[in-house]
Amino acid sequence: MAKKRTGTQHKDKQGRWWAIVTYTDSSGRRRFVKRRASSKYDALDKTNGLLIEFKSGGERAMDGARLTFEELAESYRKKYVKPAHYVGEKKVSGLKSYVQVGANLDVVRNYFGSHLVRNIRPSNLDAFKQERLDAPTIHGKQRAVASVNRELETLRAVLNYACAEGYITRSPFTGAKGLIEKSHEVSREVVLARGDEVRLLAVCTGAREHLRPLAICAMDTGARRGELFKLTWRDVDFDAGVIRLRATTTKTNKRRTVGITERLREELLELARLAPDPVDGLVFGVTSTVKRSWKTACRLAGIEGVRFHDLRHTAITQMVETGMPQMEVMKISGHTQMATFARYVNPQDDNARRGAAALDAARKKFTDNAAGTEGGTVQESDTVN
């Protein structure tokens, strides 16, 4: 524990006043912290403030006085930004998305690197957000609000870490209300029409043959791309007619089960027949990405603006269309929040037209009934007369 702290005020040769606190740290080293002051009395106030800070936060508070964001970011990276480690199927440390978090951390570190952590204010956070929104992507396109929000979330986590470690007493995010606005994110609402689906599968031949079973599995189970890439034959139960997704491969770290449709069964049986390792081998044999072959397939099928993840949207929307209870669909899709699940339930044009037709029918029925009631009243009146 640090000890023997003293506070003084000093005026340098340039006539500048400084508040200085000197202390011996836990390793026995003599250390000091100083802050610029506008006058002798300001230096005295700042000295007392440092002593109070030292009393409440100890060495860490003093370290935080000169800690740069770059130093903090590297400390955070070493502790948290590393591959997920599991005991059984339970994640005990690390991150599944450590690569993306690391990329976000690089962005915020490059911006705030030389800033003293204790001097970062809500206005600095807002300036960072605006600069990132104004900066185009490497492809020259408008940067998405969602991308900037993910960077801000990483920045918030780093500053919360600084609070937990005692380097600062309060995160600047506490005074930055509304900085991360999820409602401003543009959610994708793309669902493949039945015709698009047929054309897409028709072009999954030759060099794109590996896409066919992968796309069918995505459209018939609603599983995420990463979950499908990590699927092994041990996870496929043909007798029970299900695929059991392990907690170590799902986004929510929870195991779940999805059913096997007839067309998916045919595809899987053929893959199993050719599989070099029918137990622990990867079902689809994909280890990195299918972006190039997917883009080519969409172009040949005449489909624009469709991502592979949109097949998950398609599956969930079609499940809801069958009349399945939403809570049941959520268990299959692995959603834990209704708000997130609702973004995946997208009515197609046919559904929208059916909804309009239903309203027309109801309105016509009401109008006809009203007219009949009025006419009946008049006839009854005539009879009385």
Image (spheres, rainbow, N blue to C red):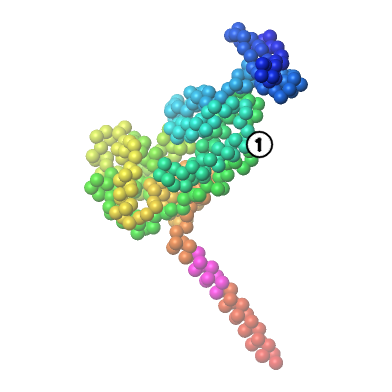
Region rendered in magenta: 355-364
Element class at badge 1: helix
Q: Which residue matches tag 1?
A: 175
| Rendered-image quadrant of the N terminus | top right
What residue occupies the far front of the structure in this picture?
14
Q: Residue at x 54, y 68 (%)?
A: 359
Q: Residue at x 53, y 23 (%)?
A: 71
Q: Between residues 189 and 86, which one lies in front from this camera angle?
A: 189
Q: Residue at x 46, y 53 (%)?
A: 189
State yes or no: residue 362 in magenta. Answer: yes
| Rendered-image quadrant of the C terminus | bottom right
Q: Is residue 94 left or right of residue 204?
A: right
Q: Is residue 213 visible?
A: no
Q: Is residue 181 visible?
A: yes
Q: Is residue 80 above or below residue 228?
A: above
Q: Is residue 255 above or below residue 313?
A: above
Residue 13 picture quarter:
top right
Q: Residue 258 at what x, y percent from top left?
A: 41, 44
Q: Is residue 110 above or below residue 378?
A: above
Bin the neighbour count of mark 1 within 10 Å (Cα to Cα): few under 14, some 14-19, many 20 and up.
Answer: few
Q: Residue 82 at what x, y percent from top left?
A: 45, 27
Q: How many marks?
A: 1
Q: Residue 365 at what x, y percent from top left?
A: 56, 74
Q: Between residues 113 and 325, which one lies in front from this camera angle?
A: 113
Predominant secondary structure, magenta span? helix
Q: Amino acid at mark 1?
A: Gly
Q: Residue at x 49, y 26 (%)?
A: 77
